[in-house]
Image (spheres, coloured by chain):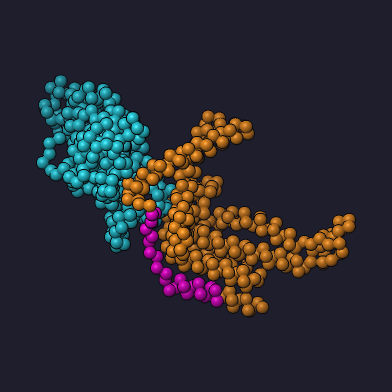
Chain colours: A orange, B cyan
Amino acid sequence: MKLQNFRRPRRHRQFHGTGSMDYYAAQSELRNWNGSYKVIAACMVLLLCLILNQLEISVTVIVSMGIVNIWGNQVSFRDYAGFLKIPMAFLLLGSGVIAFGISKYPLGDFRISLHWRYLCISDEGIRQALELFFKSMGAVSTMYFLALSTPAGELAGILRKAHVPKVVVELMHMIYRFIFILTKVQGNMKAAAVSRLGYVDFKTSCRSFGQTGGNLFLLSLRKANTYYDAMVSRGYEGELVFWEEEKPVKLWQVGILAMYAAGLVFLYFWVK
Amino acid sequence: MESNTEEILRTERLTYEYQPGSPALRELSISISQGEKIAVMGSNGAGKSTFFLNLNGVLLPTEGTIFYRGKRIGKKDLNDLRKHVGFVFQDADNQIIASSVQAEVAFGPVNLKLPKGEIEKRVTRALEYMDLLEYRERPPHYLSGGEKKRVSIADIIAMKPEVILFDEPTAALDPLSGDMLEEVLDKLSGEGKTLLISTHDVDFAYRWAQRILVFDKGGLIADSNTLEVFRQEEVLKRAHLKKPQMLTVYETLLRKNLIRPDSYPRQAKELAETLM
């Protein structure tokens, strides 16, 4: 379901505001697909991408997941590029290192002499680094597919079905809900501090930030109490159960997944 | 207030202490009949919310008893009270717990251990009632304040309680949401629900309520029909309440012989009709 009347001012991307991953998950076109199906699909593609371990496969996964995220999950291209930027920076640094080697002898296809050691790069090293980089990016895009199509609350429900301990699932629900309440409160407190010049310079900022944090802690204790009252008032008896909508898996959805997986395997043998 | 309908809730010398020695509620004996529209008034900290939490079975009275339909509510019957008496909290953000509107509204029915089909029916009906159907799948943190309030009311409607307690529902609502709230209240009393609303808005109380309870420092200082309460200057002064605008207007017009005596209009429309 697309939420047309979501107010969505074009603002700087925030963690919990509009344009956040949670926001996209809530308005994704794929939101009404069965949650377990999405988890299984994501895991399957992830495994194929890792096991088949081939540059062409990885690129195919990155591109296809990108298409799914932008068309299916309705993520704007700009925001999606933003989401990819963070892991990309890490992976570039991480896999870049693999291409290089340090040796006493002039090995590899290219080398730079550093007095008594050589910094060498081989064709194979570059290939390996590239493969690793694209493979990881493929894995990241697949996980983004899951995160951008399935809200955290639903994910918790799937974990419950997968027999993850109740405490963990209940905590997940509560934390998810509280993140938004506390960030809102924190935002208000910060605004109040800013309006009284609480952030004029570094020293004041540190102090204001600390005080806001302390207040937030006390406030969350109090809020937890009212929350508990509200839950008890609606018949909570020690077990937090949420109603989940049934979203049956459709045959054509399974078909798409099977075809996609078969396509990847076929590509693997064809390239090989 | 004399009434020939059935008594639904009664408190006998209800006392509640958060800390020993400083009672938040002092020996309240109140009888509430089915279908009544009651406004609970009093300054902040007078004990309105504590009274509601007791009526709802969240807090256990320190002393005194609560009767629901003549049945004495002991420690083990608190869930009965929670089932039949619904409580709409003042701040919707303190009440909303699930991560989608429909899961939120279903929270109460799920706890009532209702069958799945029934839950679904009740959720749909409650959402329809509060005009929230199109918000069904949205996460509550992307809703506006008025929408959240509507969700918190739908939460309670889905549990189908006979008595509904509203803790300052008109606070922090824009005029449009306020109007909508009053419509919903009318609809609910039309269905025979018993409503108790705590409020600081004297004009709203005068317009809406049949009966008013005035609290002061945990004690009950007035309990009678709306008009009588607002004509007791002493009570109004003690509870720091103002006289409703409409009543002041009426009294002024009466002094000048411009309005029919004993008409006591509650709304602008009625006022226009009773002018001479």
Residue at the farthest top position: B255
Asked if residue A96 is positioned above or below residue B257 in the image, the reply reads below
Inspect this view and state whether residue B147 appears: no
Residue B275: where, in percent of width, then height?
A: 14, 29
Residue A1: where, in percent of width, then height?
A: 41, 59
Asked if residue A12 is positioned above or below residue A107 in the image, the reply reads above
Which corner quadrant of the image does residue A264 belong to? bottom right
Residue at the farthest right position: A115
Asked if residue B256 is positioned above or below residue A150 in the image, the reply reads above
Which corner quadrant of the image does residue A201 belong to? top right
Name which residue lies at 42% across and 69% down: A249
What span is colored magenta in the figure?
A239-262
Image quadrant containing the C terminus of chain A = bottom right
Name which residue lies at 40% across and 65% down: A247
Q: Does the magenta segment cover residue A251? A: yes
Inspect this view and state whether residue B159 appears: yes
Name which residue lies at 63% across and 34% down: A202
Residue A94: where, in percent of width, then height?
A: 69, 58
Which corner quadrant of the image does residue B183 belong to? top left
Q: Nearer the viewer, residue A165 or B3?
A: A165
Q: Nearer the viewer, residue A234 or B14?
A: B14
Give the side of residue B92 with respect to residue B55, left or right. Answer: right
Q: Nearer the viewer, residue A10 or B38?
A: B38
Name which residue lies at 77% across and 61% down: A100
Give the side of residue A39 with respect to residue B106, left or right. Answer: right
